[in-house]
Amino acid sequence: MSEPVVAVRDLFREYKTTVGLLRRKPRIVNALNGISFDVQPGEIFGMVGPNGAGKTTLIKILATLLLPTSGTAQVLGYDVVHHERRIRQHINFILGGERGLYWRLSGYDNLRYFADLYRLDRATAETRCKDLLTLVGLWDRHDERVEGYSKGMKQRLHIAKALINEPRVLFLDEPTIGLDPLAARMLRELISEIRSRGITIFLTSHYMWEMEILCDRLAVLCDGKIITLDSPANLKNHVNGLEVVELQVLGTLDEVADRLRARPYIDTVSLSSSGHAQTIRVQTDDAQATISEIRQSLPGIDLSRLVVRPPNLEDAYIKLVGGES
């Protein structure tokens, strides 16, 4: 196996904060708690985990935007603490959201500005800007102000901006967040195209099906620790032999969830809300007994919204992080 593009060993990152209203007390929060992993050349390496698990903190350390408290992290063989300038020549990153673009400039002028920051000569900059805007499907709108772009177009312009220095490693932190389905699909296709150019991609997302499609390997991060790291297919082995029972109702299902958790044939129970509706998702090795328990807990309930299905990667993730939504 070739040398890893990213090598992390026993990495810690602590934040000092205070708690309390009147007598504030110091508190140390471990955003990263001794994680270790490698990323191989040319792979799409994914990292998933609940909010606050430490994903963005890790990307900022690897992108040399934040110093670790202890441990080591190398990118392309360079240490993130001592060789940040060498690393920055060969990487780029996109953080979720629309920040980082100049809205009163055109898409083309945005790229020209960043090409100047990387000290590209004029001829190279003009060629690369046109090629990248064509790659992301924006050349026909290149002379329009970014403020008139849709959110998906802005995110594709972010991708073009991140490729202006021809990076060897690209860090993407939730790049499809908030995009409509069509824009998100276009961005996923773009990520696959970038990978085909030999660029190593470090990707985070909350969309498990998206990570299953794109990633070669996935690390599950929880409370600052990697609890497992494997291919998406192998991660689904954690829910072998289980079925998933889902039910959506108006109102709350907290009491039903607590009752189900006490049953021996129930593996995990998670709840999610959308407006006034709440969905309960149960991983079980006895679907019929689970449905009977739901009937008893909710007499007279309309079961037309009840679904029994095989588990997917999202269900494996829920099991691994302890049933958290």
Image: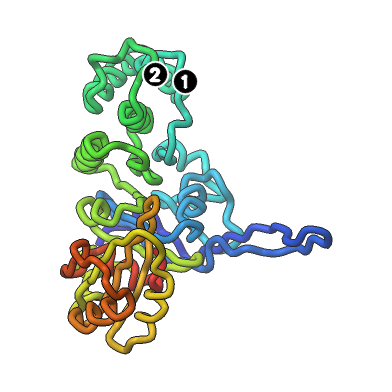
Residue closest to the eye, 256 or 97: 256
- The first of marks 1 and 2 along the sequence is 1
Residue 5 percent coordinates (x, y):
35, 52
Given the current orientation, which residue lies at the most extreme right position? 23
Residue 173 seen: yes
In this rendering, position of residue 132 left or right of residue 101 = left
**Which quadrant of the figure has residue 119?**
top left
Residue 225 percent coordinates (x, y):
47, 68
Spatial separation of the CA atoms under disc 1 and disc 2: 7 Å
Residue under numbered circle 2: 146
**Which class describes the residues within 10 Å of circle 2: few (<14), some (14-19), or many (20+)?**
many
**Which quadrant of the figure has residue 286?**
bottom left
Q: Secondary structure at mark 2?
A: helix
User: At 57% from the left edge and 56% from the top edge, which residue is drawn?
Assistant: 68
In this rendering, position of residue 19 left or right of residue 98 = right
Q: Which mark is residue 256?
A: none
Given the current orientation, which residue lies at the most extreme top position? 143
Q: Quadrant of the N terminus?
A: bottom left
Q: Which mark is residue 102?
A: 1
User: At 52% from the left edge and 43% from the top edge, which residue is drawn?
Assistant: 84
User: At 43% from the left edge and 70% from the top edge, which residue is drawn?
Assistant: 254
Residue 18 percent coordinates (x, y):
73, 59
Residue 194 seen: no
Q: Secondary structure at mark 1?
A: loop
**Which class describes the residues within 10 Å of circle 1: few (<14), some (14-19), or many (20+)?**
some
User: What amino acid is found at the position of numbered circle 1 in the picture?
Assistant: Tyr
The answer to whether marks 1 and 2 mark residues whose Cβ atoms lie closer than 8 Å is yes
In this rendering, position of residue 254 left or right of residue 144 = right
